Amino acid sequence: MAGSYEAMWEKLNLDLEAHAGLLEVLGKFYGDIYLSQDKRLRGMEYLDFVLSEIHGLRIKELQEAKAQGRKVVGTFCVFVPEELVYAADAIQVGLCAGAEAGFDKAEKILPRNTCALIKSFVGFKLSRLCPFFESCDLIVGETTCDGKKKAYEIFADYAPVYVMEIPQMKHACDRDLWKAEVLRFKEAVEKLTGRTITAESLKKAVRLINDRRRVLQRLNRLRAAEPTPISGRDVLLVNQVSFYDDPARFTQKISELCDELEQKIARGEGVADGAQRVMLSGCPMAIPNWKLPYIIESSGAVVVGEESCVGTRNTRDLVDESPDTLDALLDALVDRYMRIDCACFTPNQERLDHIVAMARELKVKGVIHYGLSFCQPYGIESFKVEKALRQAGIPMLTIETDYSMEDVEQLKTRVEAFVEMIR
Protein backbone atom coordinates (compact mmCIF):
# COMPACT_ATOMS: atom_id res chain seq x y z
CA MET A 1 0.00 0.00 0.00
CA ALA A 2 2.76 2.44 0.94
CA GLY A 3 4.22 3.02 -2.51
CA SER A 4 1.04 4.33 -4.10
CA TYR A 5 0.05 6.66 -1.26
CA GLU A 6 3.32 8.16 0.00
CA ALA A 7 2.85 11.41 -1.93
CA MET A 8 -0.62 11.83 -0.39
CA TRP A 9 0.69 11.07 3.11
CA GLU A 10 3.57 13.51 2.64
CA LYS A 11 1.12 16.19 1.54
CA LEU A 12 -0.84 15.51 4.74
CA ASN A 13 2.39 16.09 6.71
CA LEU A 14 2.62 12.59 8.18
CA ASP A 15 5.89 11.36 9.65
CA LEU A 16 6.47 8.91 6.80
CA GLU A 17 9.10 6.77 8.51
CA ALA A 18 7.15 6.39 11.76
CA HIS A 19 3.91 5.84 9.82
CA ALA A 20 5.50 3.04 7.77
CA GLY A 21 6.63 1.39 10.99
CA LEU A 22 3.13 1.68 12.45
CA LEU A 23 1.51 0.08 9.38
CA GLU A 24 4.02 -2.77 9.45
CA VAL A 25 3.31 -3.55 13.11
CA LEU A 26 -0.46 -3.26 12.67
CA GLY A 27 -0.37 -5.49 9.59
CA LYS A 28 1.34 -8.28 11.54
CA PHE A 29 -0.95 -7.76 14.55
CA TYR A 30 -4.01 -7.96 12.29
CA GLY A 31 -2.73 -11.11 10.61
CA ASP A 32 -2.12 -12.85 13.92
CA ILE A 33 -5.52 -11.95 15.38
CA TYR A 34 -7.83 -12.04 12.36
CA LEU A 35 -6.39 -13.85 9.35
CA SER A 36 -5.38 -16.84 11.47
CA GLN A 37 -9.01 -17.68 12.32
CA ASP A 38 -10.68 -20.89 11.10
CA LYS A 39 -14.19 -21.10 9.57
CA ARG A 40 -14.17 -17.42 8.65
CA LEU A 41 -16.94 -16.00 6.47
CA ARG A 42 -16.16 -14.95 2.89
CA GLY A 43 -17.88 -11.64 3.58
CA MET A 44 -15.10 -10.74 6.01
CA GLU A 45 -12.75 -10.34 3.04
CA TYR A 46 -14.30 -6.90 2.50
CA LEU A 47 -13.41 -5.92 6.08
CA ASP A 48 -9.88 -7.23 5.55
CA PHE A 49 -9.64 -5.05 2.44
CA VAL A 50 -10.94 -1.98 4.30
CA LEU A 51 -8.36 -2.48 7.06
CA SER A 52 -5.56 -2.96 4.55
CA GLU A 53 -6.57 0.30 2.85
CA ILE A 54 -7.77 2.28 5.86
CA HIS A 55 -4.90 4.77 5.60
CA GLY A 56 -4.83 4.49 1.81
CA LEU A 57 -7.92 4.20 -0.36
CA ARG A 58 -10.31 5.58 2.29
CA ILE A 59 -8.08 8.64 2.81
CA LYS A 60 -7.89 9.07 -0.98
CA GLU A 61 -11.71 9.08 -1.06
CA LEU A 62 -11.80 11.75 1.64
CA GLN A 63 -9.26 13.89 -0.22
CA GLU A 64 -11.26 13.60 -3.44
CA ALA A 65 -14.43 14.60 -1.59
CA LYS A 66 -12.63 17.61 -0.09
CA ALA A 67 -11.43 18.62 -3.56
CA GLN A 68 -15.10 18.72 -4.59
CA GLY A 69 -15.88 21.07 -1.70
CA ARG A 70 -17.19 18.59 0.88
CA LYS A 71 -16.02 18.87 4.50
CA VAL A 72 -14.75 16.10 6.78
CA VAL A 73 -15.75 15.99 10.46
CA GLY A 74 -13.83 13.77 12.90
CA THR A 75 -15.34 12.45 16.13
CA PHE A 76 -14.51 10.30 19.14
CA CYS A 77 -17.97 9.56 20.52
CA VAL A 78 -21.34 8.12 19.49
CA PHE A 79 -23.07 11.15 21.01
CA VAL A 80 -22.17 13.35 18.02
CA PRO A 81 -25.27 13.31 15.76
CA GLU A 82 -23.78 12.31 12.43
CA GLU A 83 -27.16 12.73 10.74
CA LEU A 84 -26.56 16.49 10.90
CA VAL A 85 -23.14 16.10 9.28
CA TYR A 86 -24.50 14.07 6.36
CA ALA A 87 -27.55 16.36 6.06
CA ALA A 88 -25.08 19.15 5.25
CA ASP A 89 -23.35 16.93 2.63
CA ALA A 90 -20.26 16.52 4.81
CA ILE A 91 -18.56 13.26 5.85
CA GLN A 92 -18.08 12.00 9.41
CA VAL A 93 -15.26 9.66 10.44
CA GLY A 94 -14.09 8.14 13.70
CA LEU A 95 -10.58 9.08 14.79
CA CYS A 96 -7.61 6.93 15.78
CA ALA A 97 -7.58 6.16 19.51
CA GLY A 98 -6.87 2.46 19.98
CA ALA A 99 -3.07 2.08 20.09
CA GLU A 100 -0.10 3.21 22.16
CA ALA A 101 1.33 5.25 19.29
CA GLY A 102 2.75 8.60 20.35
CA PHE A 103 2.32 8.08 24.10
CA ASP A 104 5.77 9.56 24.75
CA LYS A 105 4.69 12.85 23.16
CA ALA A 106 1.22 12.76 24.73
CA GLU A 107 2.69 12.34 28.21
CA LYS A 108 4.62 15.59 27.80
CA ILE A 109 1.33 17.51 27.92
CA LEU A 110 -0.97 15.03 29.75
CA PRO A 111 -0.63 13.32 33.14
CA ARG A 112 0.72 9.76 32.88
CA ASN A 113 -2.33 8.42 34.71
CA THR A 114 -4.62 9.54 31.87
CA CYS A 115 -6.65 6.79 30.20
CA ALA A 116 -5.12 5.17 27.13
CA LEU A 117 -7.86 6.33 24.77
CA ILE A 118 -7.15 10.00 25.51
CA LYS A 119 -3.38 9.55 25.33
CA SER A 120 -3.88 7.70 22.06
CA PHE A 121 -5.76 10.41 20.18
CA VAL A 122 -3.40 13.09 21.46
CA GLY A 123 -0.40 10.90 20.65
CA PHE A 124 -1.56 10.13 17.11
CA LYS A 125 -1.96 13.84 16.40
CA LEU A 126 1.31 14.99 17.95
CA SER A 127 3.24 12.16 16.26
CA ARG A 128 1.68 12.88 12.84
CA LEU A 129 0.67 9.25 12.41
CA CYS A 130 -3.01 9.45 11.49
CA PRO A 131 -4.13 10.69 8.05
CA PHE A 132 -7.74 10.89 9.32
CA PHE A 133 -6.75 13.64 11.77
CA GLU A 134 -4.98 15.52 9.00
CA SER A 135 -8.00 15.18 6.68
CA CYS A 136 -10.47 16.74 9.11
CA ASP A 137 -11.87 20.24 8.69
CA LEU A 138 -13.35 20.02 12.18
CA ILE A 139 -12.83 17.67 15.14
CA VAL A 140 -15.79 17.31 17.50
CA GLY A 141 -15.19 16.49 21.15
CA GLU A 142 -17.72 15.96 23.91
CA THR A 143 -17.87 16.15 27.70
CA THR A 144 -18.47 12.46 28.47
CA CYS A 145 -15.65 12.49 31.03
CA ASP A 146 -13.44 15.03 32.77
CA GLY A 147 -10.29 13.63 31.14
CA LYS A 148 -11.57 14.17 27.60
CA LYS A 149 -13.11 17.51 28.49
CA LYS A 150 -9.80 18.94 29.72
CA ALA A 151 -7.73 17.21 27.04
CA TYR A 152 -9.75 18.95 24.32
CA GLU A 153 -8.66 22.31 25.76
CA ILE A 154 -5.05 21.35 25.08
CA PHE A 155 -5.86 19.56 21.82
CA ALA A 156 -7.40 22.76 20.45
CA ASP A 157 -3.86 24.16 20.14
CA TYR A 158 -3.12 21.51 17.50
CA ALA A 159 -6.40 21.07 15.59
CA PRO A 160 -9.76 22.80 14.93
CA VAL A 161 -11.87 21.54 17.84
CA TYR A 162 -15.57 21.95 18.62
CA VAL A 163 -16.91 20.56 21.92
CA MET A 164 -20.50 19.45 22.61
CA GLU A 165 -21.76 19.44 26.18
CA ILE A 166 -23.36 16.13 27.16
CA PRO A 167 -25.93 16.18 29.97
CA GLN A 168 -25.10 14.12 33.06
CA MET A 169 -28.71 13.35 34.06
CA LYS A 170 -31.97 12.70 32.19
CA HIS A 171 -34.51 15.14 33.60
CA ALA A 172 -36.57 17.47 31.39
CA CYS A 173 -34.05 20.27 31.92
CA ASP A 174 -31.25 17.95 30.74
CA ARG A 175 -33.15 17.22 27.54
CA ASP A 176 -33.51 20.98 27.05
CA LEU A 177 -29.75 21.35 27.44
CA TRP A 178 -29.11 18.56 24.95
CA LYS A 179 -31.55 20.01 22.42
CA ALA A 180 -29.76 23.35 22.68
CA GLU A 181 -26.45 21.57 22.05
CA VAL A 182 -27.85 19.73 19.02
CA LEU A 183 -29.13 23.02 17.58
CA ARG A 184 -25.78 24.69 18.30
CA PHE A 185 -23.98 21.84 16.53
CA LYS A 186 -26.37 22.13 13.56
CA GLU A 187 -25.42 25.80 13.22
CA ALA A 188 -21.72 24.93 13.46
CA VAL A 189 -22.04 22.30 10.72
CA GLU A 190 -23.97 24.72 8.50
CA LYS A 191 -21.29 27.36 9.01
CA LEU A 192 -18.52 24.86 8.25
CA THR A 193 -20.14 23.56 5.06
CA GLY A 194 -21.92 26.67 3.84
CA ARG A 195 -25.05 24.55 3.45
CA THR A 196 -28.43 24.93 5.13
CA ILE A 197 -29.85 21.73 6.62
CA THR A 198 -33.43 21.23 5.43
CA ALA A 199 -36.17 18.81 6.45
CA GLU A 200 -35.55 16.92 3.21
CA SER A 201 -31.78 16.63 3.65
CA LEU A 202 -32.07 15.65 7.31
CA LYS A 203 -34.75 13.04 6.60
CA LYS A 204 -32.48 11.52 3.94
CA ALA A 205 -29.52 11.50 6.34
CA VAL A 206 -31.60 9.93 9.13
CA ARG A 207 -32.58 7.12 6.76
CA LEU A 208 -28.93 6.63 5.69
CA ILE A 209 -27.65 6.24 9.25
CA ASN A 210 -30.69 4.24 10.41
CA ASP A 211 -30.09 1.78 7.56
CA ARG A 212 -26.57 1.24 8.85
CA ARG A 213 -27.92 0.68 12.36
CA ARG A 214 -30.53 -1.75 11.01
CA VAL A 215 -27.97 -3.92 9.28
CA LEU A 216 -25.87 -4.03 12.46
CA GLN A 217 -28.99 -4.95 14.44
CA ARG A 218 -29.56 -7.77 11.96
CA LEU A 219 -25.96 -8.92 12.40
CA ASN A 220 -26.42 -8.98 16.18
CA ARG A 221 -29.62 -11.03 15.88
CA LEU A 222 -27.89 -13.57 13.64
CA ARG A 223 -24.76 -13.92 15.77
CA ALA A 224 -27.00 -14.84 18.72
CA ALA A 225 -27.74 -18.19 17.07
CA GLU A 226 -26.52 -21.43 18.60
CA PRO A 227 -23.94 -22.54 17.63
CA THR A 228 -22.36 -19.11 17.21
CA PRO A 229 -21.82 -18.55 13.46
CA ILE A 230 -19.23 -15.73 13.65
CA SER A 231 -16.46 -14.82 16.07
CA GLY A 232 -16.76 -11.87 18.42
CA ARG A 233 -13.52 -10.54 16.98
CA ASP A 234 -15.03 -10.33 13.51
CA VAL A 235 -18.18 -8.59 14.75
CA LEU A 236 -16.06 -6.11 16.72
CA LEU A 237 -14.16 -5.39 13.49
CA VAL A 238 -17.44 -4.80 11.65
CA ASN A 239 -18.53 -2.32 14.33
CA GLN A 240 -15.15 -0.58 14.30
CA VAL A 241 -15.13 -0.20 10.51
CA SER A 242 -18.65 1.29 10.62
CA PHE A 243 -17.10 4.48 12.02
CA TYR A 244 -14.74 4.89 9.04
CA ASP A 245 -16.43 3.51 5.96
CA ASP A 246 -18.92 5.14 3.60
CA PRO A 247 -22.30 4.43 5.26
CA ALA A 248 -24.19 3.28 2.15
CA ARG A 249 -21.38 1.00 0.95
CA PHE A 250 -20.88 -0.41 4.43
CA THR A 251 -24.60 -1.18 4.79
CA GLN A 252 -24.63 -3.04 1.48
CA LYS A 253 -21.52 -5.11 2.31
CA ILE A 254 -22.70 -6.05 5.81
CA SER A 255 -26.10 -6.98 4.37
CA GLU A 256 -24.28 -9.42 2.09
CA LEU A 257 -22.34 -10.73 5.10
CA CYS A 258 -25.65 -11.28 6.93
CA ASP A 259 -27.03 -13.21 3.93
CA GLU A 260 -24.02 -15.51 4.18
CA LEU A 261 -24.54 -15.83 7.94
CA GLU A 262 -28.15 -16.91 7.42
CA GLN A 263 -27.00 -19.68 5.11
CA LYS A 264 -24.42 -20.80 7.63
CA ILE A 265 -27.03 -20.86 10.43
CA ALA A 266 -29.41 -22.88 8.23
CA ARG A 267 -26.64 -25.49 7.84
CA GLY A 268 -26.16 -25.55 11.63
CA GLU A 269 -22.52 -24.50 11.35
CA GLY A 270 -20.73 -22.74 14.19
CA VAL A 271 -17.41 -20.97 14.45
CA ALA A 272 -16.35 -22.10 17.93
CA ASP A 273 -17.73 -25.55 18.77
CA GLY A 274 -17.95 -26.13 22.53
CA ALA A 275 -16.88 -22.57 23.41
CA GLN A 276 -18.62 -20.84 26.34
CA ARG A 277 -20.86 -17.94 25.36
CA VAL A 278 -19.78 -14.67 27.00
CA MET A 279 -20.67 -11.01 26.60
CA LEU A 280 -18.34 -8.02 26.73
CA SER A 281 -19.48 -4.91 28.57
CA GLY A 282 -17.92 -1.53 29.29
CA CYS A 283 -15.49 0.80 27.55
CA PRO A 284 -15.36 1.20 23.76
CA MET A 285 -12.64 -0.53 21.73
CA ALA A 286 -11.24 1.58 18.90
CA ILE A 287 -9.08 0.16 16.09
CA PRO A 288 -6.65 -1.59 16.70
CA ASN A 289 -7.69 -2.46 20.26
CA TRP A 290 -8.30 -6.20 19.76
CA LYS A 291 -6.30 -7.56 22.70
CA LEU A 292 -9.03 -8.65 25.09
CA PRO A 293 -11.40 -10.25 22.52
CA TYR A 294 -8.43 -12.24 21.19
CA ILE A 295 -7.53 -13.41 24.69
CA ILE A 296 -11.14 -14.38 25.42
CA GLU A 297 -11.56 -16.31 22.19
CA SER A 298 -8.23 -18.06 22.70
CA SER A 299 -9.34 -19.25 26.16
CA GLY A 300 -12.31 -21.48 25.39
CA ALA A 301 -14.99 -18.78 25.04
CA VAL A 302 -16.69 -16.90 22.24
CA VAL A 303 -17.98 -13.31 22.48
CA VAL A 304 -21.63 -13.17 21.35
CA GLY A 305 -22.40 -9.54 22.22
CA GLU A 306 -20.85 -6.19 23.14
CA GLU A 307 -22.57 -3.77 25.49
CA SER A 308 -20.38 -0.92 24.35
CA CYS A 309 -20.25 2.25 22.28
CA VAL A 310 -18.54 0.07 19.66
CA GLY A 311 -21.48 -2.32 19.91
CA THR A 312 -25.14 -2.23 20.89
CA ARG A 313 -25.02 1.19 22.58
CA ASN A 314 -24.37 2.66 19.15
CA THR A 315 -26.87 0.56 17.19
CA ARG A 316 -29.76 -0.28 19.56
CA ASP A 317 -31.93 2.81 18.95
CA LEU A 318 -33.14 4.29 15.66
CA VAL A 319 -34.19 7.87 14.94
CA ASP A 320 -37.92 8.18 14.23
CA GLU A 321 -38.18 8.65 10.45
CA SER A 322 -41.88 9.60 10.36
CA PRO A 323 -41.70 13.39 10.96
CA ASP A 324 -41.72 15.65 7.88
CA THR A 325 -40.83 19.02 9.39
CA LEU A 326 -37.33 20.10 10.35
CA ASP A 327 -38.31 20.88 13.95
CA ALA A 328 -39.95 17.47 14.44
CA LEU A 329 -36.97 15.66 12.90
CA LEU A 330 -34.59 17.55 15.20
CA ASP A 331 -36.73 16.55 18.19
CA ALA A 332 -36.58 12.91 17.03
CA LEU A 333 -32.80 13.23 16.81
CA VAL A 334 -32.60 14.70 20.33
CA ASP A 335 -34.76 11.90 21.75
CA ARG A 336 -32.77 9.12 20.09
CA TYR A 337 -29.41 10.34 21.37
CA MET A 338 -30.80 10.94 24.87
CA ARG A 339 -31.50 7.19 25.05
CA ILE A 340 -27.76 6.43 24.99
CA ASP A 341 -26.82 4.92 28.37
CA CYS A 342 -23.19 6.00 28.67
CA ALA A 343 -21.58 5.67 32.10
CA CYS A 344 -21.36 9.47 32.21
CA PHE A 345 -25.00 9.52 33.35
CA THR A 346 -26.12 9.45 36.96
CA PRO A 347 -28.12 7.57 37.97
CA ASN A 348 -27.76 5.01 35.18
CA GLN A 349 -30.33 2.30 35.83
CA GLU A 350 -31.02 2.08 32.08
CA ARG A 351 -27.57 0.63 31.45
CA LEU A 352 -27.91 -1.92 34.25
CA ASP A 353 -31.27 -3.04 32.89
CA HIS A 354 -29.91 -3.28 29.35
CA ILE A 355 -26.91 -5.38 30.42
CA VAL A 356 -29.02 -7.90 32.33
CA ALA A 357 -31.63 -8.12 29.54
CA MET A 358 -28.94 -8.52 26.88
CA ALA A 359 -27.12 -11.23 28.83
CA ARG A 360 -30.37 -13.17 29.19
CA GLU A 361 -31.38 -12.76 25.55
CA LEU A 362 -27.99 -13.97 24.35
CA LYS A 363 -28.03 -16.89 26.83
CA VAL A 364 -24.49 -16.12 27.96
CA LYS A 365 -22.73 -18.05 30.71
CA GLY A 366 -20.96 -14.93 31.95
CA VAL A 367 -20.13 -11.27 31.36
CA ILE A 368 -16.64 -9.79 31.11
CA HIS A 369 -16.68 -6.11 32.11
CA TYR A 370 -13.86 -4.24 30.38
CA GLY A 371 -12.52 -0.97 31.72
CA LEU A 372 -9.59 1.09 30.49
CA SER A 373 -7.14 1.91 33.25
CA PHE A 374 -7.97 5.33 34.78
CA CYS A 375 -11.46 5.39 33.19
CA GLN A 376 -13.42 6.44 36.25
CA PRO A 377 -17.02 6.35 34.87
CA TYR A 378 -16.89 2.72 33.72
CA GLY A 379 -14.48 1.61 36.44
CA ILE A 380 -16.74 2.87 39.24
CA GLU A 381 -19.97 1.78 37.57
CA SER A 382 -18.67 -1.80 37.25
CA PHE A 383 -19.56 -2.25 40.96
CA LYS A 384 -23.26 -1.69 40.23
CA VAL A 385 -23.07 -3.76 37.04
CA GLU A 386 -21.68 -6.73 38.97
CA LYS A 387 -24.37 -6.33 41.64
CA ALA A 388 -27.16 -6.30 39.02
CA LEU A 389 -25.73 -9.35 37.26
CA ARG A 390 -25.24 -11.21 40.54
CA GLN A 391 -28.89 -10.65 41.43
CA ALA A 392 -29.78 -12.08 38.00
CA GLY A 393 -27.57 -15.12 38.64
CA ILE A 394 -25.02 -14.21 35.94
CA PRO A 395 -21.27 -14.36 36.79
CA MET A 396 -19.06 -11.38 35.92
CA LEU A 397 -15.31 -10.92 35.57
CA THR A 398 -13.92 -7.38 35.83
CA ILE A 399 -10.91 -6.62 33.65
CA GLU A 400 -9.00 -3.34 33.82
CA THR A 401 -6.23 -2.89 31.31
CA ASP A 402 -4.71 -0.54 28.71
CA TYR A 403 -3.31 -0.90 25.20
CA SER A 404 0.03 -2.48 26.13
CA MET A 405 0.84 -6.17 25.65
CA GLU A 406 2.66 -6.48 28.97
CA ASP A 407 -0.29 -8.00 30.84
CA VAL A 408 -1.44 -10.48 28.16
CA GLU A 409 -0.35 -13.60 30.05
CA GLN A 410 -1.83 -12.36 33.32
CA LEU A 411 -5.14 -11.55 31.61
CA LYS A 412 -5.18 -14.89 29.83
CA THR A 413 -4.77 -16.71 33.15
CA ARG A 414 -7.68 -14.79 34.68
CA VAL A 415 -9.94 -15.27 31.65
CA GLU A 416 -9.17 -18.99 31.45
CA ALA A 417 -10.04 -19.38 35.13
CA PHE A 418 -13.32 -17.51 34.58
CA VAL A 419 -14.21 -19.65 31.56
CA GLU A 420 -13.48 -22.82 33.52
CA MET A 421 -15.68 -21.58 36.35
CA ILE A 422 -18.69 -20.83 34.10
CA ARG A 423 -18.22 -24.11 32.24
Image (spheres, grey):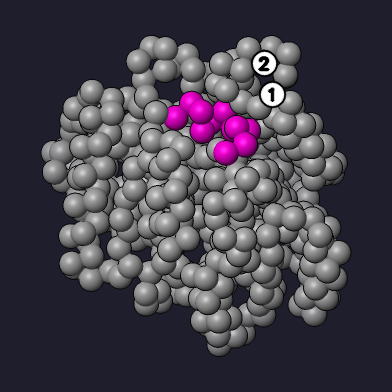
- Would residue 159 appear left or right of 57 to someone viewing this image? left
Question: Does the residue at mark 1 contact the one at mark 2 (Cβ under 8 Å)?
Answer: yes
Question: At which x and y percent is residue 279?
Answer: 64, 65
Q: Is residue 346 above or below residue 311?
A: below
Q: Which residue is mark 2?
A: 6
The percent coordinates of residue 154 (x first, y second) are 44, 48
**Percent of width and height locating residue 109:** 54, 51
Mark 1 — residue? 16
Marks 1 and 2 sit apart, C-alpha to C-alpha, by 8 Å
> Label 1 sits on what residue type?
Leu
Which amino acid type is shown beneath numbered disc 2?
Glu
Between label 1 and label 2, give the one nearer the viewer.
Answer: 1
Q: Is residue 242 visible?
A: no
Q: Which residue occupies 41% across, 57% down?
A: 149
Instruction: Report the span colored magenta.
Output: 126-136
Query: Residue 36 magenta-drawn?
Result: no
Viewer-side residue, 159 vs 397 = 159
Please, is residue 127 above or below residue 408 in the view?
above
Residue 135: say if magenta: yes
Are there few (<14), some (14-19), or many (20+) residues within 10 Å of tag 1?
some
Decide: is 271 above or below 385: above
Between 43 and 27, the residue placed more toward the observer is 27
Q: Earlier in the sequence, mark 1 or mark 2?
A: 2
